[in-house]
Amino acid sequence: MIQEKIIDLLNSMTLDEKIGQLIQITPQLYYDDTSSTAETGPIEKLGISEEHLYNIGSILNCGGAEKVKKVQDIFLSKNRLHIPLLFMADVINGFKTIFQIPLLQGCSWDLNLIQKCAEISAKEAAFSGIQVNFSPMVDLVRDSRWGRVLESTGGEDPYLGSIYAKTIVETYKSCGIASCVKHFAAYGASQSGRDYNTVDMSEREFREYYLPSYKSAIEANCDLVMTAFNILNGIPCSSNKYLMYDILRNELKFNGVVISDYSAIKETINHGYAKDSKDAALKSLNATVDIDMMSNVYYNNLKNLAFQDTNIEKLIDNAVLRVLTLKNNLGLFENPYGQLDIEKEKSYVMSSENLEIARKTTANTLVLLENKNNILPLNNNSKIALIGPYAENKGISGIWSTIFYKEIEKTITLKEGIEKKVNVDNLQIARGCHILKTSEFNNLLSSIGESCITIQNDDEMERQEFEKAINVAKNSDIIILAIGEHYKQSGEGGSRSTIELPDIQLNLLNELYKLGKPIVAVLFSGRPLAVKNFVDKVSALLWVGFPGIQGGNSIADVLFGDVNPCGKLNMSFPQSTGQCPIYYNHYSTGRPHTYNTRYASRFLDIPTYSYYPFGYGLSYSNFEYSNLVLSSDIITENSTIDLSINVKNNSNVPGYEVVQLYIQDLVGSVVRPVKELKGFKKVFFNAFEEKIISFSINNDMLKFYNHNLKFVSEAGDFKVFVGSNSRDNLWKVFSKID
Ligand code: NOJ
């Protein structure tokens, strides 16, 4: 439809019809089936009357071609102007072909891989009737206590976050599905990692670290922006006019739809920023937040507000126009079902090709953290004891997978993956223990409002399970120990004050260690865990995040050497919980930890640096770096420096290496981080192959926000580092002159 017709349509709408476009609800009111609906907030009766039900603009988390079609048909049969509903959903790491969690996808440092995961997710969702995906989540994350770090692809780095954001947005667009960048803004910086908590930071810090990934998504023409739950510098994001209007709309030129997060407009009352529901509606509308997700604030108040003030209807019109334009851009006025296709849904969703891609992409993101004496890859003829609560566990896809993926039996467990690699007579299995003691698990369940399970004789069961595991281990050459946190311990509302491995699993590990057999630990979690208290007891440690429905196959591919691991961390692993937040691109302080006195900026009981640094990850190949050369040690505004470095695969195993480039501005008009990622190359090396890898350093890489919030580079000295992670690298100094 041409844009003028959209304006005609707007002009023909009643105020009620307009306000309806600004409301998002779940589909049950049209179709009595809750199976594909996720509630991520307080479930309350919105009190929408039958009369207004057919004015609503959009639907949350309804997927499945037949279901969506039915809801759309029922709706359109009663909507006066035939304005179709818009179907929006959370397809975070896959619709039904569930990939690894985004945090693990980001460990690929591979835009093709990110693109592939996004493409399959988008197409599966689109054929199943979804028109807008609430993705990418690009919040910068530094604190492992926050349960939502699992949703971030960029992890703690704005450069990585920005290029991933762009790739995902562009991929969705090419698949005809709209993207929604979230959560604007700085949601990842919630104090102490407690979800929905306060965020307070300088504007310089915000622009330097947090804003870039959102900006990148918007520059890639992201269709929607979702507000964050938190306050930012005293004002809730969902009614923050400076953030939404001045920065987002004026500065970043975003003219798409802004949607609140789930009931976030109403929560501005709890924040103590809005006096009541009417005040909340006014403040959010003024901040140009277009859609109220799952609260009745816009529904109950906009009409009265418009009667009292004629300017309000103008604001409503602007918001409705943005929503209608989005529907029009998606072609919904011509075809209200979008790409919904019952036949394609059948043939494409979870097709064997998609599952194979999930297997490959996951294997190529797993991060090998330890491999003492090259214990990995394993020999297929070894006698293996597979032990641990994740040995046969199908809950390995992360919490977001539960919305649309219901066929959990199709998930490949670690046991099923390993069985395809070895003679099953050589494989024995024992769980050893649950992820948590039953009482601890019940605490978890009751804290998230779920019913508890019956406690049987926990101690006795524990003893028996331990005993069985030890017997199994005694008969083996090697122990694969599958451990980690429960998927319900991470994700939204999944903050934790301790991120060490649960005691029951540590006890099991200690018992097994006494047998003196090599232990290969496979670690499942939605966040970097603190592993220091057990790592000396294992020969190898493979971090698999929540690897998705092909997880068991992907892990086995790496354990047995069919895939050479190449994942590199996008988020530092801390020494202990108390070290959080921890990130590589921090400032130096006046008393750096290397200072040889008590009075230094460090902890008395742990090192200051992370346990595994950003960018870190081992391979079965052995990469050596030498001969870092700069074409010049001077750079100007318009010139560049060519950098080259020799990288050699000094092993007979072919593999990928991510060559990483970091820069430090040694002295600035405001202090600069000790290191910042400015580029990387993921390169394949044959056995014993040596290559010269080159980068070009330019003035843009030296820029930062100065005290006056101007994005500038300054004359002075810089250090450039190249290496296989943010810690181990070669370096040289160069100078910028004016
Ligand atoms: C709350 C979450 O914060 C957000 O990421 C999600 O998209 C919405 N709920 C909708 O489910």
Image (tube, helix red, strand yellow):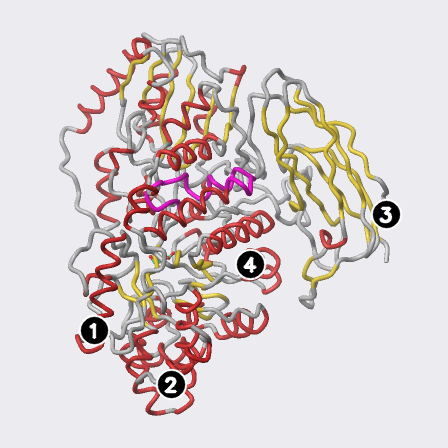
Quarter-of-image position of residue 348: top left
Relative image position of residue 540 (x, y in whole percent)? 47, 21
Relative image position of residue 655 (x, y in whole percent)? 58, 25
Q: Nearer the viewer, mark 2 or mark 4?
A: 2
Question: Which region shows up in magenta?
Answer: 93-113
Relative image position of residue 250 (x, y in whole percent)? 57, 74
In the image, is residue 467 above or below residue 180?
above
Rate crowding at label 3 as few (under 14), some (14 to 19) or many (20 or more) other CA atoms within 10 Å.
some
Residue denoted by label 2: 11
Q: How many marks?
A: 4
Residue type (three-letter) at the residue carrying disc 3: Ile
Q: Nearer the viewer, mark 3 or mark 1?
A: 1
Query: Does 649 sit left or right of 618 as displayed?
Result: right
The reply to whether the C-beta atoms of the residues labelled 4 and 1 are less than 8 Å apart is: no
The reply to whether the C-beta atoms of the residues labelled 3 and 1 are less than 8 Å apart is: no
Q: Which mark is residue 578?
A: none
Marked residue nearer the N-terminal end (2 or 4): 2
Marked residue nearer the N-terminal end (4 or 3): 4
Residue denoted by label 1: 78
Residue type (three-letter) at the residue carrying disc 4: Ala
Q: Secondary structure at mark 1?
A: helix
Query: Does 549 sit left or right of 697 as displayed?
Result: left
Rate crowding at label 1 as few (under 14), some (14 to 19) or many (20 or more) other CA atoms within 10 Å.
few
Residue denoted by label 4: 220
Q: Secondary structure at mark 2?
A: helix
Query: Does 449 sit left or right of 382 as displayed?
Result: left
Residue type (three-letter) at the residue carrying disc 1: Lys
Q: Nearer the viewer, mark 2 or mark 3?
A: 2
